[in-house]
Image (cartoon, rainbow, N blue to C red):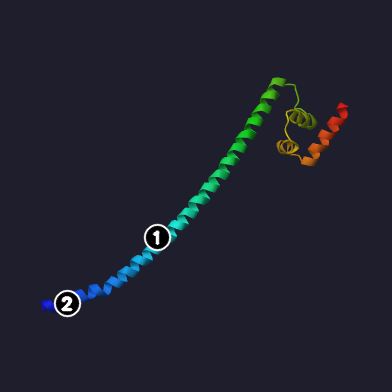
Amino acid sequence: MIAAVVMLVRRMRRAQVPQLEEFLAEAGELAKRFDRLLNDKRQLVKATLEGLDARIEELNRLIAEADERIAELKQLGPGAREPSLRDQILAMAAQGKPASEIARATGRSIGEVELVLGLGKNRGR
């Protein structure tokens, strides 16, 4: 009777080996797919962080410009008024800033900035 049980256990083991091998192969494929997906997500996170870093740098630059403008206004005194849009555009152009950057800083279109710059040149003649 014991011999029959031992034989039965051995047969069950032999029958389970192919199933275990199949299970291990499937687990290996799933691990590879998971690894690929994880790498894709890492690259996506990296690209997102780089984009956010660029935005933070731009915001810091804009904050610095705003702080400079505030300091300039404080130096003018309490009764002084803010420079006109024309004066702002001409001052930025004198600093060597391109029309696109001036437009972004003033909230105006590039065409409007270029028009003011063109009129400013004509007045200087």
Tell me if residue 50 comes above or below residue 89 in the rendering.
below
At x 44%, y 61%, the residue is: 33
At x 40%, y 60%, the residue is: 31
Q: Nearer the viewer, residue 112 or 44?
A: 44
Q: Position of residue 4 (x, y in %)?
A: 14, 79
Q: Position of residue 104 (x, y in %)?
A: 71, 39
Instruction: Evaluate whether residue 77 shows in this view.
Output: no
Q: Quadrant of residue 98?
A: top right
**What secondary structure is found at the residue carrying circle 2?**
helix
- Residue at which label 1 appears: 31
Q: Position of residue 115 (x, y in %)?
A: 83, 37
**What secondary structure is found at the residue carrying circle 1?**
helix
Q: Amino acid at mark 2?
A: Met
The numbered dot on residue 7 is: 2
At x 38%, y 66%, the residue is: 26
Q: Quadrant of the C terminus?
A: top right
**Mark sitting earlier along the chain (2/1):** 2
Q: Nearer the viewer, residue 5 or 108?
A: 5
Q: Amino acid at mark 1?
A: Ala
At x 80%, y 39%, the residue is: 112
Q: Quadrant of residue 81?
A: top right
